[in-house]
Image (spheres, rainbow, N blue to C red):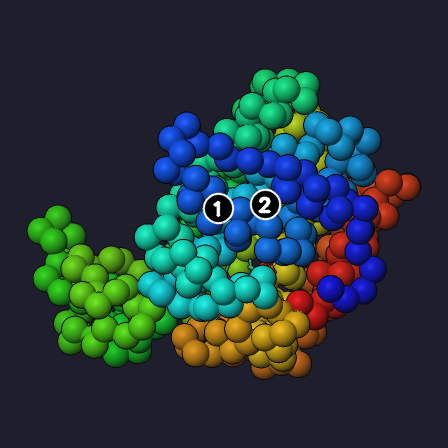
Amino acid sequence: MSGPYPDDLRAAVDAYLTALRFPARAPAVGGLEEAMRYSLLAGGKRIRPVLALATARALGLDQRAAMPLAAAIELIHTYSLIHDDLPAMDDDDLRRGRPTCHVAFGEDVAILAGDALYAEAFKHLLTAGLAAGVPAENLLVAAAELADATGVDGMVGGQFLDVTADKALAAAESGAGDPVGFDAAASPADDVAPGPETPLPAAAPGSGGPAGPTVAVPVAPVVTAEDLRVLHELKTGRLIGASVGCVLAIAGVDDDRAAALRGFAADLGVLFQVVDDILDVTGTDLDLGKPQGSDERHGKRTYVTEYGLDGARSMATELHDAASTALRSAVPSTGAEDLHTLTAFIHTRTN
Ligand code: IPE
Ligand code: IPE
Ligand code: MG
Ligand code: MG
Ligand code: MG
């Protein structure tokens, strides 16, 4: 970690997550919980749950009401990391300073650990949230927002854009000439429109497994600045946005202050991923706890490939300034100190 951080909130999150168990009725399922807790308790920065608790503090909401949501978000984030690291995705072997879940437990168990973390997240949000006294209606609104932020219009949709962007661009550059390219691999299924006549690419690590895809998937190239921002908004920004937005839902706050806080969270989410792109180039495995250079190895389009390091750094500064201004207008008096600390941390972090 670098720079000041709301350490008390992080300690509260860590203690809560450590106490969280996923007990199985069948003892033979115990190994699944072990894999889930291996990744969950590996010492992440806890930015999303801390952001949720800091938002609760700014709104004057009791921490106990926000904690089930904060934990649920960290469960979902951990699942996204486990799947992101899989050989079919970024194929990375180091995460949070230890071997990735699939390296430690095998790909099959890692996939299931991710799946289980996702389901347990919603179970926990709803059951522990109710037990903490959050009105059921507010919980439902929060759960719907969390599902939306992680689904097709959120994190998973962003990951889809991320893993297909290079294929789409190659198709566009090879003369497909269509703004929506097609990943033309093998015979398209009858009900899918045929793609451009590009030859079947050789299966490469992280490109969908040895056999490659068998159905042509429509993919859109990430070309413009707007495309890249949308990718970052979805794959990372939406879950960070939900860390603020779902707390607003739980608190039942839906006024001008809520709109300003949502604007703050949107800039913060994109800032987070721009800095992640920069650190992928400038960081070290030791500091990051994950492999440096993963984006370059996979030919990913990032803020650094598009704008250079200096360009990406200036954009990060602009996003930081915009987020800080939005936060000052949302909470002009006291209460938002932790949110300001987090905003500065996300800008200047080195891990
Ligand atoms: C990494 O997130 C994945 C991205 C969305 C860029 P974090 O940098 O928050 O990872 P942890 O939770 O601290 O390990
Ligand atoms: C992944 O982005 C974002 C997720 C939804 C997990 P990255 O692939 O850049 O994340 P890191 O760098 O591996 O943590
Ligand atoms: Mg990735
Ligand atoms: Mg990755
Ligand atoms: Mg990254």
Q: Which residue is mark 2?
A: 74
Q: Is residue 263 visible?
A: no
In the rendered image, which quarter contains the C terminus?
bottom right
Q: Is residue 199 left or right of residue 126?
A: left
Which quadrant holds residue 335? top right
In the rendered image, the vertical position of residue 259 relative to residue 347, given as above or below: above
What residue is pinned by disc 1? Answer: 34
Q: CA distance from mark 1 to mark 2?
A: 17 Å
Name the foreground residue: 55 vs 34. 34
Say the numbered circle drawn on residue 253: none
Q: Residue 228 in the image: x percent, y percent? A: 50, 65
Mark 1 vs 2: CB contact within 8 A: no
Looking at the image, residue 68 lies above or below residue 171: above
Dot 2 amino acid type? Glu
Disc 2 within 8 angstroms of ligand 1 (CB): yes
| Residue 190 x %, y % | 9, 51
Is label 2 in a helix, a strand or a loop?
helix
- Residue at x 10%, y 62% (from the top left corner): 187
N-term mark: 1 or 2: 1
**What crowding class fits label 1: few (fewer than 14 Cα within 10 Å), some (14-19), or many (20 or more)?**
some
Q: Nearer the viewer, residue 89 or 225?
A: 89
Residue 173 location (% of width, % of height): 30, 78
Picture residue at 28% right of the left edge, 64% below the top: 208
The residue at the point 44 percent across, 73 percent down is 300
Q: Secondary structure at mark 1?
A: helix
Residue 317: x and y in percent read 73, 68
Viewer-side label of 1, 2: 1
Q: Residue at x 81, y 38 (%)?
A: 58
The residue lying toward the viewer, choosing from 175 and 201, is 201
